[in-house]
Image (cartoon, coloured by chain):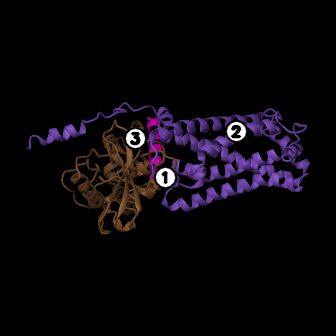
């Protein structure tokens, strides 16, 4: 396959960026999207040019490091992570636009790499349990109803890649935060901090400069792990409940 | 290496200080309701539902036009006498007006502040454009502005009579609305506005349900059905009046 790539190049956080055009040839349709970029970078290095910086780690769709907006879609045309996107999703001769996540809370570090530490600080604000857990306990020690376990697991699938923020026209982190809040709030292990968790995590989310939710649904469409849109409603319910309880105290 | 590990972790965590509220220094519930994005959306949801309830009553009231001038005008007088003798003349009507003004102001101020925040959160657009979200969703902001302007014109036209075409007669809505809908611009403005109402309600009602935490995976279809039905019935109900005047059914 022969492709034309239009890639966002930006030297550093302070510099102005622009789209640069590159031609790549000899791309196999069995390559992953990142392997295609590796091919481009090898050529650039051989030519003595600066390779395109992009985030990647596990390359098996579970770490949440890769983060590219491909032709306007976070993680590209398939509902998966960029590392699990294969070149068979494209045609020979295609022009592909590659851009970084866009959100003021995710400033560009270089080229396609953005600083997603805002997510870490949301987790720090309450995305944990305080109970000392030690080694894995006996499975029946704390019974969890099956629907609750399923609900928690569905939300625990979030890998924190930030595609929801990138896809949202408001740069909102509601889907990410709701996945984390719902995952822990429904479980007995997470219930001691049920109210403080949602209040603090939402507070941190707002402080980081993420936008508000207008229920466009773009986040859930982009999510490679299929965190559903009603997660946001579930978190809203938790937040309103926690705020009511705080008012009584 | 072992002794280095904790230092490395600490450094990683300490690259940027955690902004925002320290634990134990949480803002008051009323404060966080107004300061938080979720709280402001709650204000929008509740005020929106109040206005939606009013719109349903208003639309049903408008249908009185099909039962002749006497019934319509009697209904207008009733709106002033309702609540009597417990309440003084027009008190109930003014109460409704005060609640509505509060709802409009709360809705508009929240929308303005949230929109500013949203635009700031996504300062740079993607080079590769693609159509995002449904038409109703994308037109919420402009639709809201159109509706706000329409409400001003609508009150000046049919409540105060300031910009009314022809002779405005207080407590004779039947004759007044025929005046308005006998002008081309009256029809155009009104039909555009009530179409905007339909689109606004379509996304707004469903969104309000999500914001208030009523939505879940099982209720998705039901909530969307209610939203679409409300939008359609409201628009058709409102549009029926100018159409009736234009076609001569009401004259």
Which subunit holds the residue at mark 2? B
Label 1, on which residue?
A: B129
Q: Is residue B101 above or below residue A130?
A: above
Q: Which residues are magenta?
A: A231-249
Give the alpha-carbon distance from disc 2 to disc 1, as whole Å. Answer: 31 Å
Point out which mark residue B149 bears: 2
Q: Is residue B183 above or below residue A66?
A: above
Report if residue A190 is visible in the image: yes
* Residues tagged 2 and 1 counted as in contact (Cβ below 8 A): no
Which subunit holds the residue at mark 3? A
Q: Secondary structure at mark 1?
A: loop
> Is residue A174 or residue A61 the one in the foreground?
A61
Q: Position of residue A18 (x, y in %)?
A: 39, 44
> Is residue B200 or residue B188 the one in the foreground?
B188
Q: Secondary structure at mark 3?
A: helix
Q: What crowding class fits label 2: few (fewer than 14 Cα within 10 Å), some (14-19), or many (20 or more)?
A: few
Is residue B11 found left or right of B203 in the rendered image?
Answer: left
Point out which mark residue B162 bears: none
Give the alpha-carbon distance from disc 2 to disc 3, as whole Å. Answer: 34 Å
Which mark's residue is nearer the viewer, 2 or 3? 2
Is residue A29 found left or right of B162 in the rendered image?
Answer: left
Locate the C terminus of chain A and report the quarter of the image it occupies: top left
Where on the picture, by quarter, is residue B76? top right
Colour seen for chain B? purple
Report if residue A57 is visible in the image: no
Locate the N terminus of chain A and report the quarter of the image it occupies: bottom left
Colour seen for chain A? brown
> Is residue A210 or residue B24 the one in the foreground?
A210
Name the N-terminal-most of marks 2 and 1. 1
Which mark's residue is nearer the viewer, 2 or 1? 1
Label 3, on which residue?
A: A205
Give the alpha-carbon distance from disc 3 to disc 1, as whole Å. Answer: 27 Å
């Amino acid at each position: 396959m022969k492709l034309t790539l239009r890639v966002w190049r930006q030297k550093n956080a302070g510099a102005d960026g622009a789209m640069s055009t590159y031609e790549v040839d000899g791309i196999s349709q069995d390559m992953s999207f990142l392997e295609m970029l590796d091919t481009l970078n090898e050529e650039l290095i051989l030519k003595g040019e600066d390779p395109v910086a992009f985030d990647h780690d596990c390359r098996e769709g579970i770490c949440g490091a890769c983060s590219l907006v491909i032709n306007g879609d976070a993680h590209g045309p398939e509902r998966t992570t960029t590392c699990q996107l294969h070149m068979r999703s494209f045609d020979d001769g295609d022009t592909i636009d590659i851009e970084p996540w866009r959100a003021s809370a995710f400033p560009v570090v270089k080229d396609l790499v953005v600083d997603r530490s805002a997510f870490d600080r949301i987790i720090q604000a309450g995305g944990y349990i305080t109970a000392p857990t030690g080694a894995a306990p006996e499975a029946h020690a704390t019974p969890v109803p099956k629907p609750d376990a399923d609900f928690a697991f569905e939300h625990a699938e979030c890998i924190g890649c930030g595609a929801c923020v990138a896809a949202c026209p408001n740069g909102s982190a509601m889907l990410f935060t709701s996945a984390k809040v719902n995952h822990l709030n429904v479980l007995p292990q997470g219930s001691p901090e049920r109210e403080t968790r949602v209040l603090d995590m939402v507070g941190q989310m707002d402080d980081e400069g993420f936008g508000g939710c207008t229920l466009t649904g773009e986040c859930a469409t982009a999510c490679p792990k299929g965190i559903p849109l009603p997660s946001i409603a579930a978190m809203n319910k938790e937040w309103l409940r926690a705020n009511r309880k705080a008012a009584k105290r | 290496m072992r002794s280095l590990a904790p230092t490395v972790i600490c450094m990683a965590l300490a690259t940027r200080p955690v902004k925002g509220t320290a634990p134990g220094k949480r803002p008051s519930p009323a404060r966080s309701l107004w300061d938080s994005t979720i709280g402001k959306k709650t204000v929008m949801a509740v005020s929106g539902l109040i206005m939606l309830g009013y719109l349903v009553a208003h639309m049903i009231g408008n249908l009185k036009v099909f039962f002749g001038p006497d019934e319509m005008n009697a209904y207008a007088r009733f709106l002033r006498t309702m609540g009597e003798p417990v309440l003084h003349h027009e008190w109930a009507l003014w109460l409704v007006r005060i609640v509505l003004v509060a709802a409009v102001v709360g809705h508009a101020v929240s929308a303005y502040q949230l929109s500013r925040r949203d635009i700031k959160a996504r300062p740079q657009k993607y080079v590769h454009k693609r159509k995002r979200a449904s038409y109703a969703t994308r037109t919420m902001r402009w639709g809201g502005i159109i509706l706000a302007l329409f409400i001003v014109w609508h009150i000046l036209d049919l409540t105060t009579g300031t910009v009314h075409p022809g002779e405005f007669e207080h407590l004779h809505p039947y004759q007044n609305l025929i005046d308005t809908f006998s002008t081309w611009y009256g029809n155009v403005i009104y039909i555009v506005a009530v179409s905007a109402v339909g689109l606004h309600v379509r996304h707004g009602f469903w969104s309000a349900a999500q914001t208030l935490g009523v939505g879940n995976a099982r209720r998705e279809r039901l909530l969307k059905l209610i939203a679409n039905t409300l939008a359609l019935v409201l628009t058709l109900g409102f549009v029926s009046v100018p159409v009736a005047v234009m076609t001569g059914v009401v004259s």
